[in-house]
Image (spheres, rainbow, N blue to C red):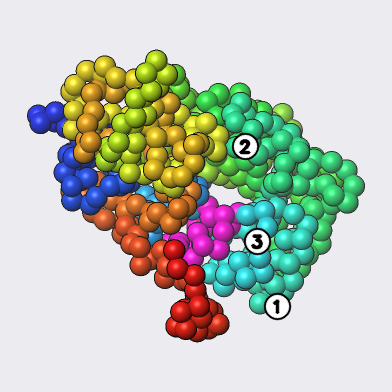
Amino acid sequence: MSQSLKVNAAGHLEIGQCDTVMLASEFGTPLYVMDEDMMRSRMQEYRREMAQQLPTGIVAYAGKAFLTTAMCRLVASEGLWLDVVSGGELYTAVTAGFPTARILFHGNNKTDDELMLGLEAGVGRFVVDNFRELERLAELARKKHVRPGVLLRVAPGVTGHTHQYIQTGQVDSKFGFPLVEGVHGLWAAVARTLASESLALRGLHSHIGSQINELEPFAREASALMQTMVEIRRRFGVVLPELDVGGGLGSRYSKEDNPPAIGAYIEAIAAAVTAVARQYEYPLPMVIVEPGRSIVAEAGITLYTIGAKKVIPDVRTYLAVDGGMGDNPRPALYHATYQAVVANKANAKATEIVTIAGKHCESGDILIWDAELAPTEPGDVLAVLSTGAYNYSMASNYNRVPRPAVVFVHGGEAELVVRRESYADIVRNDVIPARLESRAAAGGLARP
């Protein structure tokens, strides 16, 4: 949980020295609140551990976890690289003035427009996911007379123990080149990249999944990738200088979660890479890690206003809030778990067991099953913890509900970094065809 969460003299929950009840009053709810100091602290810890254990290594923040222009500025100020997975994320980074040479551009189906955006921006590395992309990137780069750096994404056959929807390293995956012989495998991709005059093969990339709370899968992944680089040297006579092992380190969402420390995570990767390098006398590559969730998840909370309560005797009590799956679809998608506290009664004893229900028109719109809370009443402020990763990123306008605002808190100050959407924003891109306009003017539309 956020290192700056505490209860103040008024009995209210604080984050970043800001009273959450006051934040809800000033900015409205639902509201995403991000602890800037904690995010910086996590980034600095990653850089410090890399400097100690893999001195030539690089830390790249995985933007898909949480990305805004302000976040890009924060990441840049801490000296990290940035990984983006779409034209939209890349555009956000470019708009924020992020140094594009420190951008890794991911994505399993980049369009020509996205590839061109990356080439024109001068991104540092394209992480190429398939043969189609390899072909299109080579052709577009040739036409622009540039030679971008390329990492080939590998499906190494390594998985972490996490939900199947967020496993990505297995052979049966939409991501990456499988480690198989023949025209569909990695070896063919290496050969084609090396033969291209418009692409510069720099290394390999892999990402085995998300919310992984064990070290062993990361060590196996790093070892497998290093051995693959050794095999590339044997087959093709080239020494690849870069190895990107992705991210995936878990965060604490509930009392049962116990993710490894950042230092232990880096140590496991360093030990695996170094062992293979020594065994095969392979030059130690520049190792890249891509943390996202472990930087921002516990730094964020979401504030809601409590509304209706529905008591079903001897069955369940539902407590409704003014948000739900539109601002946090993760419980509905893969049964993600969270903890919550009544922010204006943070000192009160938890005596109620309630199920936190969202306002969207779905029975599955449940944020937390069987939460233990202090007694509640309409108008109370509920804080759901550890919502910094993927909540804002995955938010939608389901039921045409506007998406929440985002604030950064730092040293007792709160600053808006994303404005709350309005109803006008919801319809801004709607277009009514002329034929419907004329029918409406003639009174031809049915009245309720």
**Place of residue 151 in the rendered image (x, y in percent of width and height, measured from the top left):** 66, 52
Circle number at residue 11: none
Q: Nearer the viewer, mark 2 or mark 1?
A: 2
Instruction: Residue at 84% x, 41% y: name it.
Output: 180
| Camera sees residue 195 | yes
Q: Amino acid at mark 2?
A: Tyr
In primary-sequence order, the first of circles 2 and 1 is: 1
In primary-sequence order, the first of circles 1 and 3 is: 3
Q: Height in image: 41 above or below 8?
A: below
Residue numbers of the magenta segment = 83-106
- Between residues 254 and 143, which one lies in front from this camera angle? 254
Instruction: Residue at 80% x, 40% y: name it.
Output: 179
In primary-sequence order, the first of circles 3 and 2 is: 3
Q: Secondary structure at mark 3?
A: loop
In the rendered image, which residue does mark 1 sit on? Answer: 143
Quadrant for the N terminus, please.
top left
Q: Secondary structure at mark 2?
A: helix
Q: Height in image: 326 above or below 307?
A: below
Q: Amino acid at mark 1?
A: Lys
Q: Nearer the viewer, mark 1 or mark 3?
A: 3
**Place of residue 169 in the rendered image (x, y in percent of width and height, measured from the top left):** 68, 37
Q: Is residue 156 left or right of residue 85?
A: right
Q: Secondary structure at mark 1?
A: helix
Instruction: Residue at 42% x, 70% y: name it.
Output: 428
In the rendered image, which residue does mark 3 sit on? Answer: 110
In the rendered image, which residue does mark 2 sit on? Answer: 165
Q: Amino acid at mark 3?
A: Lys
